[in-house]
Image (tube, rainbow, N blue to C red):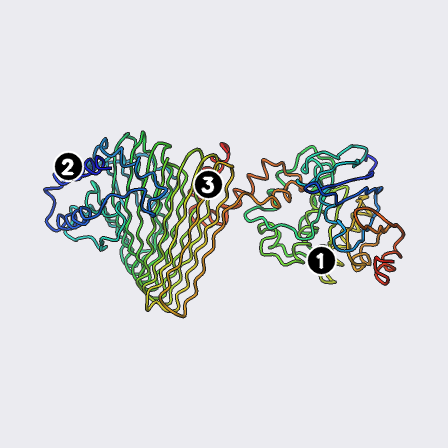
Amino acid sequence: MADNQLALRDLQSAHMELFSDIAEVQKSDRKRAQELLSEKSLPTATEEEWRYSRIDTLLSKVGNFEVGGATVYDSGREPLIDGAFSGRILLTDGHLWFNGADGIRIEQIDNSDNPSTFAIDNSDDYFRIFARGYAPVALRVTIEEGYQLQDPILLEVELNASTTLVAPRFEFIFEKGSSASVIEVVTGGGGASLLTPLVEVGVRSGASCTYSYLQNCDGWASIVENVVIEADKDSKVTYNAFGFGADYGRLRFDGRIVGDDVDMKVRACYFGSDSQMLDFRTFQRHIAPRSTSDLLFKGAVGNEAHSVYSGLVVIEEGAVKSDAYQTNRNLVLSPGARADSVPNLDIRENSVRCSHASAVGPIDPEMMFYLESRGVDPDEARRLIIEGFFKEITETIPNLNLRSQIGALVANKLKGI
Amino acid sequence: MAKRELIIEDLHVSIDGKEIVKGFSIEVKSGEVHAIMGPNGSGKTTLASAIMGKGGYEITKGKITLDGQDITHLPTYQRARGGIFLISQLPSELGGVYLDDIRRAQPHESEYRVERDLERELSSIGLDKELAGRAINVGFSGGEKKRFETLQLSLLGAKLALLDELDSGLDIDALREVSRRISRMVKEEGLMVIAITHYSRLLKELVPDVVHVYEKGRITESGNFELAFELEKTGYQR
C-alpha cells in the first residue's frame, strides 16, 4: 500500500505542474481540493465502503498510469447513439470537442473566472475530490433559464489508450425553469485503464432534468464514477444508470434535495457477467421538506460476476413530509454469481414516509413454469423473464435510440450466460 | 383432425420422495368435460401440475397418452405445444412479459394453435382491452387474472384444458362469461376439459359429463352431474 500511496502522490505533483498556469480563482478551487485530498488517506478494501471494490489492485496499477491533457478539436466523430442532439460533448483520449444549440452554454471551467458551484468537504468520496483537484478537463454545461430543449445533450467519454488514468469533470447547471435531458456514455478503457469521472448537476428552481448514464467500458477497464445532483425548489429530476461494462464498475450517486417540493426519481439496471464486479453506492439526502425521492435499482449477475448495492436514505431535521423510497432487486443467474444488497435509512425527522426493500434470488421457478406451460421453450422463457425484469425500467427511457441500445446490451449479455 | 383422447393410466407422483398421487386413472374423449372434486389437501393441484410436467413432480409409475402419443416424460413446453393448457389456481405475475411474447414464441408448424380476433375474444370473455396489453397478470385482480388466462386459452387454442380451481377469485358474472367461452370451445372444437374444484358452483356453469371424487391420490367414485350436488350436501366423508 505504501508504494501505491507514493505513486499516486507522484501523479498528483505531475498534475500540479500541469495546472500551474491556470487562473488564480481556479487554482484556489483546485488547491482546496488538493489540500483536502492530501488529508485523506487512500481508500483501501479494509474500509466497509470499499470492501468489494478491488481498490487495492486498482491502485497498484496507478504508478503506471499516464495523465491525459485536453486538446480542443474542431470536429468530433459520429455519435455512439443515433438521433438528433441539442448539444454534444466528446472527450476521447484527452481530446475534447463540443458544441451546443441555442440555450446551451458550454465552457471550460479552467478558462472561466467563476469557481465551482458545488462545495466539497472531507466527507466526500475520494475520487470526487481527486477529480476536483486534478481533472485534466473540466467543463461546465449550462442550460439557460427557461429553455426547454427537445433533443438530448450527448456526453461521450471514450478512452482507447491503455494503462491511462482519466478523471474528467463535468458540471451541468439547469437554470431556473429550464428543461433538458442528458445522455452520458462512457466506453473504452483499453488495457487496465482507470476512469474516475465526476459529474455534478445543479437543478435550479422549477427546472426539469433527465439524466441517463450508460457505462459500457471494455472488460479490462475500471471505472469509479461519482455523480452529485442537487435539486432545488419545485424541480424534477430523473436519473437513470445503466451498468454493463468494465472489470470493476462503480457508481456513487449523491442525490441532494436542497429545496422544497422536489420530485426525484433514481433508476438503475445493471448486468454483470464473467468475473465483473459492479458496485453501486447511493445517497438520497433530504435536506428540505415536502419532497419525494424514489429509487429503484435492478440488477442481474451471471457466471462469476458480483454486484453490490448499498444505499442510504437520509432525512435531515427539518425535512418534514418527505417521502423516500428505496428498492433494490437482484437476479442471480449462475451458482458462481453473487449479489449483495444493503439498503439503509437514517431518519432524523417525524412525519415522513420512508420505505426500503431488497431482494436477491434466482429466477422464480413459477414464472418459468408459467411460460413453459404456454409452449415457450426454457431458454426463451428465461430470456423473456430477464428482459422483462429490466423492462420495468428500460421502458421508461424517453430516448428510443438509447432504449434500443440498452435492449441490445441486455440481449448480448444473455448470450454468454 | 386426429382423434382426440387423453388416457392416464395408474399415475403415481411423488414430491421429494413422498407419494402424493397414488394410482390415478382417467379417460377423456373429445368434447368431454370431467370434473374432479375432492377435499383440501387431497393432491388435486399436484395432479394438475404433474400432468403439465412441472419440475419437482416426479412421475414414478404410470403413463399419460394424448392422442395416442406417450407424453409421460416430455418437458412442459412440449406438452403445451402438444395441446395441454393449464390454468393455475393462482396464476403467476410476469413483470415485463406480454401476451405478444408468448404468441411469438409459439412454433409455426402447430396444427391447432389458432389466430382469433382479439377484439371479439376480449368482449366474449369480458376483459378490458387495456389489460390485455399489459404485462402478464401484473396488477390484475383475481377475476381479471382468470379472464386473462381464459383469453390465452382461446387465443392459443388447446386440446385439453386443465382448470385448477377456475372459480377461485371469480364473481358470478365473471364465472359465467369465462365458463361460457370454455363451453363453446368444448362444443365447437372438441376441447377436452378436466376441471378441478371444491365446489359445484363452477359446474353449474361448465356442465360436466363425468364427476370424479378424488381422495388420497386416486379416484374413489365416479358418476354423472348429480354426484357433484350430492357431494355438496353430504360432504366427502360418506
Which residue matches tag 3? A338
Whether label 1 touches label 3, CB < 8 Å: no
Q: How far apart are marks 1 and 3 (CA)?
A: 39 Å
Instruction: Classify 10 Å Cα crowding around label 1: few (below 14), some (14-19), many (20 and above).
Output: some
Q: Name the residue under label 1.
A: B168
Which x, y percent locates residue A173? 27, 54
Q: Which amino acid does label 1 sit on?
A: Ser
Q: Residue at x 75, y 34 (%)?
A: B71
Q: Mark 1 lies on which chain?
A: B
Residue A39: which disc?
none
Q: Position of residue A245 (x, y in %)?
A: 39, 37
* Residue in the image at 48% along x and 34% along y: A303
Q: Mark 2 points at which residue?
A: A14
Mark nearest the camera among 1 and 3 is 3
Badge 3 and badge 2 both on one subunit = yes
Residue B67 x/y as whole percent: 80, 35
